[in-house]
Amino acid sequence: MADPDLIAIPTDEDGVRGFLHEPRQSLGRGMVLTHGAGSNCSSPLLVKLAEAFRGAGVSVLRCDLPFRQGRRVGPPSPKGGELDRAGLKAAVFLLRGRVTGGVILAGHSYGGRQASMLAADEPELAESLLLLSYPLHPPRKPDQLRVQHFPRLRTPAAFVHGTADPFASIAELNQAIAAIPAQTRLIAVEGAGHDLGGKRFDADRIVATVLA
């Protein structure tokens, strides 16, 4: 049976494609939630988080980035970040038309990086950030940091990171986010890798932290 609280968003609606999780009792707040470079908006992690936030009264737009709308598989182009950020901005504006309160901008890995870059450029766009497995550097290349925009980030950000993530250790991430002038929080998921899979991933804990 189809879920009456899950609305499919077609690609032709402002260029946004995804699914809207509507809560039964809304807080009036929204979340745009997107995926990493090798995935799409139907990843188990995103579905689990979307359902957890919906259960807490948040309207969640779980959406595909423009690069994934363009092709089913394969990573984004190194030159495609600007287009993906434009897609995230369109998703925020679409969701603003459906909620009365602020919008949280959330993403896994590449999606989180693009969300944070967008927020650095447009600090009024989102009320806060949820960055899952932020790809601080490529595996085994700790000198190639992706933090140039951190000193410009004025949006409060919650980072969720596995202790076995090859894209950054907890210590490395803690050191990097110290450059962010906005309020930051770091939730470490013991034993989790970059996909944050496993039984120790506590979606309810993340919801409570972000909505506090």
Image (tube, rainbow, N blue to C red):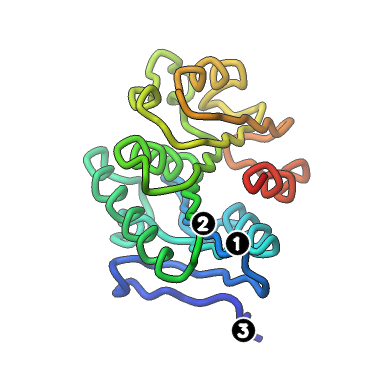
What residue sits right under mark 2 in the picture?
31
In the image, 59 versus 190, the foreground residue is: 59
In the image, 83 versus 38, the foreground residue is: 83
Q: Quadrant of the N terminus?
A: bottom right
Q: Quadrant of the C terminus?
A: top right
Residue that protrudes farthest toward the bottom in the picture: 1
Q: Callout 3: helix, strand or loop?
A: loop
Side of 178 where 124 appears, left or right: left
Where does residue 151 sit, x and y in percent of width and height?
Answer: 38, 22
Q: Nearer the viewer, mark 3 or mark 1?
A: 1
At label 2, which amino acid type do we have?
Met
Side of 67 where 34 appears, left or right: right
What residue is drawn where x is 63% and y is 80%? 3
Q: Label 3 to label 1, Cα distance in Å?
A: 20 Å
Q: Callout 1: helix, strand or loop?
A: loop
Question: Looking at the picture, does residue 12 appear above or below residue 92?
Answer: below
Where does residue 74 sit, x and y in percent of width and height?
Answer: 36, 50
What residue sits right under mark 3 in the picture?
2
Residue 58's tag is: 1
Residue 68's tag is: none
Where does residue 121 sit, x and y in percent of width and height?
Answer: 29, 37
At label 1, which amino acid type do we have?
Val
Label 2: few (<14), some or many (≥20) within 10 Å? many
Sooner in the amino-acid sequence: mark 3 or mark 1 = 3
Where does residue 64 sit, x and y in percent of width and height?
Answer: 41, 59
Q: Label 2 to label 3, Cα distance in Å?
A: 22 Å
Sooner in the amino-acid sequence: mark 1 or mark 2 = 2
